[in-house]
Amino acid sequence: MKRLAVIIPGDLNEEAFNCRVRHMEQYIASPWEIVPMTFQGEVRAIRTGADVSLLACETLKLAYRAEDSGCEAVVIHGICDFGIEAARGAVDIPVVGLGSAVFHLACQLGDRIGVVSKSDATISEFTRRIRLMGCAERMTSMRPLNID
């Protein structure tokens, strides 16, 4: 059995966490199994741009744990790809960020893209990440839902 570590961000209760895991399991085929991981530190969700930097250290710890436990790869399940550079530089297994994957796919499918974010607090960090991914010139706008 091949193991895929998935780092799931957010301040989730057990029911919400298990719901995300079940959803992912619908899309994974044998011989793969998902090894869900979540942050244990004080900051567990992105509410400000500073939280992304704080989560990078947690991502690094989880990437080490994934590699040490025999996982074949790590997926960061979040748009900001928090800590992806640090994790990629520290472990020998692939580290994939869903944010990078989604935005690059969107750029392949269309000339212009729009982004919906969870809140005003995440717009500056999302914009910075999209710029780092090389996709900013395709973005037409970003609008927040402003939900918790």
Image (tube, grey):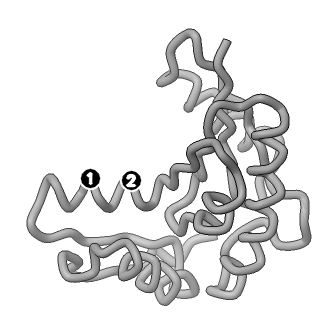
Q: Tag 2, which secondary structure? A: helix
In front here: 19 or 46? 46
Q: Secondary structure at mark 1?
A: helix
Proximity of marks 1 and 2: CB atoms separated by less than 8 Å: yes
Residue 25 placement, left or right of 141: right
Position of the C terminus by quadrant? bottom right
At a point 66% along the width and 46% down the height, the residue shown is 92
Amino acid type at image mark 1:
Leu
Residue type at the position of mark 2: Ala
The vertical placement of 79 against 69, above or below, is below
Pointer 1 residue: 105
Q: Position of residue 56 (x, y in %)?
A: 72, 70
Give the left or right position of residue 65, taking residue 127 as reference: right
Give the mark count: 2
- Residue at horizontal 47 percent and vertical 84 percent from the top: 123
- Lateral position of residue 27 relative to residue 15, left or right: left
Q: Residue 62: x, y in percent? A: 79, 51
Disc marking residue 101:
2
Q: Measure the C-alpha gap from mark 1 to mark 2.
A: 6 Å
Residue 131 placement (x, y as % from top left): 36, 82
Query: At which x and y percent is residue 14?
Result: 83, 41
Residue at 41% x, 60% y is 100
Q: Is residue 109 left or right of residue 34?
A: left
Q: Residues within 10 Å of mark 2 (few under 14, many from 20)?
A: few
